[in-house]
Image: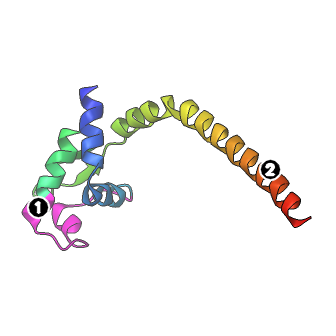
């Protein structure tokens, strides 16, 4: 559960989500990740540390080139956890849909009585 907490904590920040979206396209250097943001390199590095701690990214080493790569496995764990609640929210939405239809039917019946 601790891993899941780290993943959701990392995903809570829009900059980190944007970094993950960029890495979904392929590995990148820190400098390449800095480019689209109005943030400093140390700030992006801090975001990467959070993502690394959550297991969402890893850094390679090829000479002086240190590519950052997306690790999707922790996202699968988060998706499974969310999926466990899918039945609950679908049932809730079905109940809400039935309630709205009931209200609309009552409103239609009362509306037609008023017009007479």
- Distance from disc 2 to disc 1, alpha carbons, whole Å, reads 55 Å
> Contact, CB < 8 Å: mark 2 with mark 1?
no
Assign a secondary structure to mark 2.
helix
Q: Where is residue 69 in the image (x, y as percent from the top left)?
A: 27, 50
Viewer-side residue, 34 vs 11: 11
Q: Which of 103 and 24 is in front in this view?
A: 103
Which residues make up the magenta segment?
25-44
Where residue 15 sits in the image (x, y, percent)? 25, 60
> Which mark is on residue 105?
2
- Left or right side of 97 for 20: left
Q: Residue 75 carries which label?
A: none
Q: In which quarter of the image is the N terminus?
A: top left
| Sequence-first tag of 2 and 1 | 1
| Quarter of the image where the C terminus is located | bottom right
Q: What element carries label 1?
A: helix
15 relative position to 25: left or right: left
Question: Can residue 62 be spotted in the picture?
Answer: no
Residue lying furthest right? 116
Disc 1: which residue: 43
């Amino acid at each position: 559960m601790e891993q899941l907490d780290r993943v959701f904590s990392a995903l809570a920040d829009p900059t980190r989500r944007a970094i993950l979206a960029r890495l979904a396209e392929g590995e990148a250097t820190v400098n390449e990740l800095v480019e689209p943001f109005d943030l400093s390199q140390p700030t992006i590095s801090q975001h990467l540390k959070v993502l690394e701690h959550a297991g969402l990214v890893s850094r390679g080493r090829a000479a002086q080139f240190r590519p950052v790569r997306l690790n999707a496995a922790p996202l699968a764990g988060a998706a499974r956890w969310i999926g466990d609640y899918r039945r609950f929210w679908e049932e809730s939405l079905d109940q809400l849909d039935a309630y709205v239809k009931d209200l609309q039917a009552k409103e239609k019946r009362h509306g037609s009585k008023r017009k007479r």
